[in-house]
Image (spheres, helix red, strand yellow):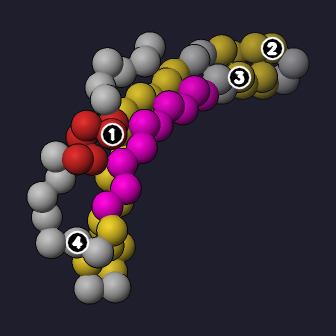
Amino acid sequence: MKLNIDIKELLGAVDVPAQWVGIREVYEAHTPRMIRDGVPVANARSSTHGIMVEVLVNGQFGY
């Protein structure tokens, strides 16, 4: 599922005293499968989706 957010618009709205600001969309999918003694015991799927913000202030990065 893609977010209906304009990241360039968000970046343009940032008004903080920072040397650098980065915004990116992040999507991760994970499919764990577990087998014990030759027998499947777990088969799942999960995902996360959101926005990551990075800021550089006084030489220090914050996330």
On the image, the x and y values in percent for residue 15 come to: 12, 58
Which of label 2 and label 1 is nearer to you? 1
Query: Magenta span: helix, strand or loop, mainly?
Result: strand
Residue that label 4 marks: 18
Near-viewer residue (8 or 56):
8
Tell me the crowding category of disc 1: few under 14, some 14 to 19, or many 20 or more residues within 10 angstroms, Cα based: few
Q: Which residue is mark 2?
A: 39
Residue tagged 1: 8
Kindly identify which residue carries mark 3.
Answer: 33
Camera-near label (1 vs 3) is 1
Task: Tell me which label, 4 or 1, sits earlier in the chain.
Answer: 1
Q: Is there a contact, CB below 8 Å, between mark 2 and mark 3?
A: no
Amino acid type, residue under disc 4 in the picture: Ala
The answer to which of marks 4 and 3 sits earlier in the sequence is 4
Whole-angstrom CA distance, mark 2 to mark 4, is 54 Å
Q: Who's the residue at 87% across and 18% down the image? A: 38
The relative height of residue 58 versus residue 26 in the rendered view (above or below) is below
State how far apart marks 1 and 3 are (Cα): 38 Å
Report the mark closest to the observer, 2 or 3.
3
Mark closer to the chain start, 2 or 3: 3
> Residue 45 at x, y = what percent?
57, 17
Work out how far the residue at label 2 is from the one at label 3, CA to CA, in angstroms.
11 Å
Gap in angstroms between the C-alphas marked 4 and 1: 17 Å
Q: Which is closer to the viewer, label 2 or label 4?
A: 4
Provide the residue span drawn in magenta.
21-30
Kindly report which numbered mark, 4 or 3, lies closer to the viewer in this rendering.
Answer: 4
Going by the numbered disc 1, the residue's amino acid type is Lys
- Residue located at (46% from left, 37% from top): 26
